[in-house]
Image (spheres, coloured by chain):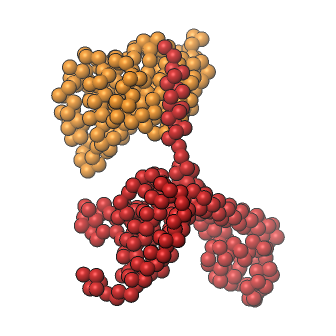
Chain colours: A orange, B red
Amino acid sequence: MELKKVIDNVFWAGDKNKLLVTRNLVTGESVYGERLLTVDGQEYREWVPIRSKLSAAFHKGLRMIDIKEGSKILYLGASSGTTVSHVSDIVTNKGEIYAVEISEEMGASLILLAEKRKNIFPLIEDARKVDSYSKFVPKCDFIYQDVAQRDQVEIFIHNSNQFLKNGSYGAIAIKTKSIDVSKPSGFIIEQTSALLRRNFTIIASIDLYPYQRDHALIIVRKK
Amino acid sequence: MDNQDYIRRARKTLKEGLSLGDLITKLVNLIDETERAENTLFEAIYDLYFMYYPEAAALLKERDEFIATISGGVDRVDVGNVLKISVESMGYDLSGDDRSLLNLHVNELKNLSDMKNFTKTYLEKVIRENYPNIYEVAGYMVAARLIMLSGGLKPLAFMPSSKVQILGAEKALFSHFRKGKSSPKYGVIFKIPTIEGAPQEKRGKIARVLASKISMAAKLDLFSKKDGSAILKEKLEEEIDRIMKNGTKKSYR
């Protein structure tokens, strides 16, 4: 099988390049029931677009994202660690992922994941209360946010001001229905982008349909 | 760098984040879900039984009565004798195998029902031991639901009693705010027999009084752990008496 590199440790596999995979950091372990495949003795994990918004973004044409081997990443809304596990594959053991999650039930799976993957630093905290975890998180190269809250843009800006290096990139997964159910998706994305423009340059805005309904991934760069 | 310290800290946060309130929430969910399963199963079994012996099924429309009567044996002879009705039936004659299958299902339903009652008894014990005051004023099921909805004893104790009164009626409350419908008079506390049994026009008032006493009970449980429920109940009865005596709305203006 041919592998075509997208970014560090992420590849398109298969004939039609329809299968996105990451190089498995922990050989033999499947995190959420995804398929494992071996190419030339190296194991890869399928990155399922309906489970992960970042994967959906790659399927919808995202070419570049500033996550590479050795990156320090702040991940807000880590949930049970589906996407986190793939980001952990990307940054490898040279990098660090600070994974913030508020829910205790999701957090338990995240902790179990972190015990297997040494580059995940779990923080069971409220992303709104930056001060409660600020001393545990260094300046980061990238912020990824997927929290599906009404005030998610404020949360993102707050965290970026505190932790993101100037000129670095971030990605914010917007769930338009969490911000306002009554308004159309496009309008919400416009509105959010306008809010973000004060502090960031908007690099790309990707609608994740059909992999995720009413979701968009906005990639920004801190001014 | 090692993530061990982070894992240790996160584990600690999780452990400290969980409390008796969470246990109660899970127990209430368990009871509700068992009840739901019981109802679903009952419907299917009832339909099957109706086909076999409609004369008896027509008399056993209540779930618990149905379970109690036919768990001793599903045959027409057994049930007919218990209910003192004719064994001659217009229903479909089930074979011996059919009936033993039906028997298995009925036993399963009975187990489910026993399980639910067992869980309820256990929940009652938990509530009585930990929140004696709320238990006395509201009863264990309502107490448990209040703890569940408010997120624990502490939030409940610090909540204004007007909010305690309508906990569980959030949908009605928001349609009151948004659409100007009339405000809800009670939430889960409606299940307290004093309210449920009261005449329609008094229920709101009784709910208000009860909620205020539940608030006090919660504060007692949180801060003193003493059983002061006797005084609370006495005052409660006094106030309810007053409400019941005052006839019309006008006397309150």
Image vertical order of residue B207 relative to residue B112, above or below = below
Q: Where's residue A203, x and y in %?
A: 24, 22
Q: Where's residue A102, x and y in %?
A: 43, 37
Q: Nearer the viewer, residue B56 or B9?
A: B9
Tell me what residue is drawn at x 36 percent, y 76 percent.
B205
Quadrant of the image occupied by residue A187: top left
Count of numbered circles in the view = 0
| Image quadrant where one finds the C terminus of chain B | bottom left
Q: Nearer the viewer, residue A202 or A64?
A: A202
Q: Where's residue B124, x and y in %?
A: 61, 62
- Does residue B98 appear in this view? no
Q: Is residue A153 left or right of residue A21?
A: left
Image vertical order of residue A25 relative to residue B210, above or below = above
Tell me what residue is drawn at x 63 percent, y 73 percent.
B63
Image vertical order of residue A67 relative to residue B9, above or below = above
Q: Is residue B141 left or right of residue A198?
A: right
Q: Where's residue A16, x and y in %?
A: 44, 22
Image vertical order of residue A220 relative to residue A125, above or below = above
Tell me what residue is drawn at x 69 percent, y 82 percent.
B56
Q: Nearer the viewer, residue B185 or A200?
A: B185
Tell me what residue is drawn at x 43 percent, y 27 percent.
A99
